[in-house]
């Protein structure tokens, strides 16, 4: 077998041929392993980057909701709403985020004295993420004021600021 691997080197002993052959095999395996790990890390970075874009839009909308005037906050919430609606097709866990966004939009609509839009946003919040009761099929319906108070309390806890 040693003659088949190294046919051009007849001066090498059988032990040397086995040693060099084993070293070549070990080097190839080690190189394949480290090459695979480097590509795997690159793929993980790409995957993380692909999910960072939508998250950045939602985070930006949340910051605008707190720090910008009502008109700019409303525009950023609408952008975030479009992103979350598209993500909801891929990931059903975005329903909760979308529901919170609708309630925040309703709070902004109240500030802008747009009660019809506020009511529509709260209805959309209820449709996007219905609150489940203790038994399957049960639904808990909260009043508009309860929903707004809960989101204001959540936002105050998240930002250490008084609610809007």
Image (cartoon, rainbow, N blue to C red):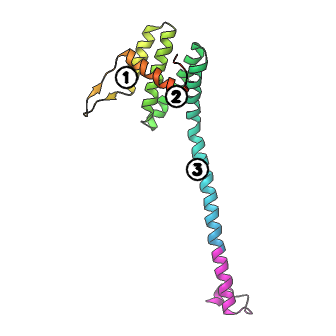
From this view, report whether residue 2 is shown above or below residue 52: below
Q: CA distance from mark 1 to mark 3?
A: 36 Å
- The front one of 36 and 146 is 146
Query: Circle 3 is placed at which residue position?
Result: 44
Residue furthest out toward the top: 113
Task: Identify which residue is drawn at 57% across, 13% down.
Answer: 70
The residue segment tinted magenta is 1-26
Query: Circle 2 is placed at which residue position?
Result: 158
Query: Circle 1 is placed at which residue position?
Result: 126
Secondary structure type for disc 2: helix
- The front one of 99 and 156 is 156
From this view, report whether residue 143 is shown above or below residue 98: above
Residue 163: image tag: none
- The front one of 11 and 53 is 53
Residue 145 is one of the magenta-drawn residues: no
Secondary structure type for disc 3: helix
Residue 1 visible? The answer is yes
């Amino acid at each position: 077998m040693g003659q088949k691997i190294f046919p051009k080197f007849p001066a090498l002993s059988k032990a040397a041929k086995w040693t060099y052959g084993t070293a070549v095999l070990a080097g190839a395996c080690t190189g394949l392993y480290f090459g695979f790990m480097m590509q795997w890390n690159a793929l993980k970075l790409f995957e993380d980057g692909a999910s960072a874009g939508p998250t950045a839009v939602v985070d930006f909308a949340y910051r605008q909701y707190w720090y910008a005037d009502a008109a700019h906050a409303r525009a950023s919430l609408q952008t975030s709403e479009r992103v979350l609606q598209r993500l909801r097709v891929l990931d059903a866990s975005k329903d909760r985020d979308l529901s919170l966004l609708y309630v925040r939009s309703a709070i902004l609509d109240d500030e802008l004295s747009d009660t019809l839009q506020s009511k529509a946003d709260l209805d959309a919040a209820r449709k996007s993420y219905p609150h489940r009761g203790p038994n399957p099929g049960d639904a808990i319906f909260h009043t508009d004021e309860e929903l707004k108070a809960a989101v204001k309390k959540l936002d105050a806890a998240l930002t250490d600021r008084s609610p809007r």
